[in-house]
Amino acid sequence: MKEIVVSGIRPTGKLHLGNYFGAFKNFLTLQEEFNSYFFIADYHSLTTHPTQSDMAGSVKRVLAEYIALGLDPEKCTIYIQSDLPETAELYLMLNMNAYLGELERVTSFKDKVRSQPNNINAGLLTYPVLMAADILIHKGVKVPVGKDQEQHLEMARTFGNRFNRLYQTDIFPEPQAFSAGKELVKVPGLTGGGKMSKSAGDADTIYLDESAETLKKKIMRAVSDSGPTVPGAPKSQPVQNLFDLMSLVCKTETIEFFDQEHKNGSIRYGDLKKQLAADMENFIAPLREKIQDTLNNEKRLDEIAKFGAEKARKNARETMNAVREAVGFKKN
Ligand code: ADP
Ligand code: TRP
């Protein structure tokens, strides 16, 4: 039997370069060989955006991007998380054996407590439980995600193993974070911080449908530093970020050239950014075009979502029946 792949992205905005290189690029490879489930995590988006003005529109946007960028509904199962009530039921069951202490220790939760101490809901606390349910409902073993999701994967293993032990079953296999490269990916943003993220704002983020003009403007305004003070000086974080972005879209010779210039202490960041902007435009241009074309085809998107939901539910129902039986409930 083919191994099972599961992953999702929250519909809280347009997809960006971090989503692409951290997660989506692996979706494209994995759909060719495995039994893959790719969903849109709209339940999850309620943890931070409980009253979205246009939820349906946001979901459709990500669905269109999935299709435009190359997911094929004939090769993998593409669905919307909330079309699978089985996920919510499994989340409820897993919550009964998830402990406050372990949930409070999760880095993403601690970050939220720090950044918005007066707005912490139970959904944020149990975010990793819902994510575990997403994966375990399909008995997923490979989970293509960026580096920021590593700890959540560890929790998914904990919850699955704990369920197996408590109810003396072997329903759930152990899921692992997946990246085609040696390591999980972290794409930096343009404002000098750690990872590119929608929540860090528009100036930090390169969207996959960015116009040529905005793209160039954003890159030319990216944070750098005042230049190496002595030849051989190490790169500052913002400059390392620019090199990391180059490694995604530029030729090796280009990177080596600017690396040498930096070592010599003669680098001109304006030139580096101009080259990065040109190579990024070459990467983005075809994606931008495909995204715009797909967005207009509403009818096809609705059909794809319906087709995917049916396929995903069939599998989810089977898992949930086994779970209900293990806990001592009757099958549905
Ligand atoms: P955001 O952080 O912008 O809100 P999401 O949390 O919806 O994006 O992330 C969806 C997927 O994209 C996850 O697998 C996540 O690991 C990946 N991802 C997001 N940002 C980055 C990044 N800067 N580098 C690598 N992967 C990322
Ligand atoms: N937590 C992931 C993110 O922000 C999204 C997500 C939800 C997910 N459920 C998942 C990813 C299950 C992989 C598998 O980025």
Image (tube, rainbow, N blue to C red):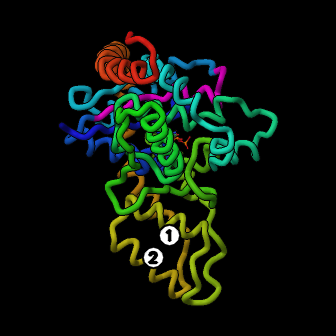
Distance of label 1 from label 2 (alpha carbons): 9 Å
On-image quarter of the C terminus? top left
**At 57% from the left edge and 69% from the top edge, which residue is drawn?**
239
How many numbered marks are there? 2
Percent x, y of residue 321 = 36, 18
The image quarter in which residue 138 lies: top left
User: Judging from the image, what secondary structure is the residue with disc 2 in?
Assistant: helix
Vertical order, 239 against 214 (above or below):
below
The disc label shown at residue 258, or none? 2
Q: Is residue 289 visible?
A: no
On-image quarter of the N terminus? top left
Kindly indicate whether the residue at mark 2 contacts the one at mark 1 (C-beta within 8 angstroms): yes
The disc label shown at residue 229, or none? none
Q: Is residue 231 visible?
A: yes
The image quarter in which residue 120 lies: top right
Q: Which residues are magenta?
A: 36-51
Within 10 Å of disc 1 (Cα), the crowding (few <14, some 14-19, many 20+) is few
Question: Residue tagged by mark 1?
Answer: 271
The amino acid pointed to by label 1 is Asp
**At 30% from the left edge and 18% from the top edge, which residue is drawn?**
314
Within 10 Å of disc 2 (Cα), the crowding (few <14, some 14-19, many 20+) is some
**At 68% from the left edge and 38% from the top edge, which residue is drawn?**
100
Please tell me whether residue 41 belongs to the stretch shown in magenta.
Answer: yes
Percent x, y of residue 42 = 52, 25
